[in-house]
Amino acid sequence: MTEWIMVGKVEDIPKLGSRVITTADGDIALFRTSDDQIFALRDHCPHKGGPLSQGIVYGHKVACPLHNWSIDLESGEAVAPDKGCSHTYPVQVENGVVAIAAPAARIAAM
């Protein structure tokens, strides 16, 4: 069963930056764009497993810090000509509080 789990506040995530949530299944990176949209991806580049949370956010994309692959924050898809996908998580923001859809027992910390 999936439910919405509160993971922090929008202001906890720097503009054009990220924060990491540790889960039993691996890390989830929360990204904040310059237009204050929040996205959540598995913190793992589909190319060589680089930590996307350490990449540079631009527009609605993040550049992997290892080999500069661009990953679309909305879909998790690598930008052509690269191919691959990082798992995305639905995000909800209400009154400045960020929640993601994930199994409740798996969220450990932000």
Image: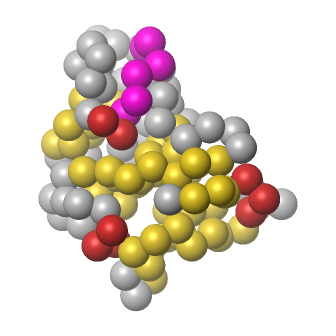
Residue 44: say if magenta: no
Image height check: is 44 above or below 33?
A: above
Q: Quadrant of residue 65?
A: top left
Decide which of 21, 76 is in the foreground and name it.
21
Query: Residue at point 25% right, 29% down?
Result: 63
Confirm whether residue 73 shows in the render: yes
With 69 as the anchor, is 28 left or right in this view?
Answer: right
Q: Quadrant of the N terminus?
A: bottom right
Image side of residue 53 versus residue 63, left or right: right
User: Residue 99 or 72: which is nearer the viewer?
Assistant: 99
Q: Please provide percent x and percent y for residue 32.
A: 29, 57
How many numbered marks does the figure carry?
Answer: 0
| Residue toward you, 42 or 20 | 20
Highlighted range, magenta: 47-52
The quadrant in which residue 5 appears is bottom right
The main secondary structure of the magenta stretch is: loop
Q: Which residue occupies 73% across, 53% down?
A: 106
Return the x and y of residue 109 as percentages of the image width and height: 57, 59
Q: Position of residue 47 (x, y in %)?
A: 43, 14
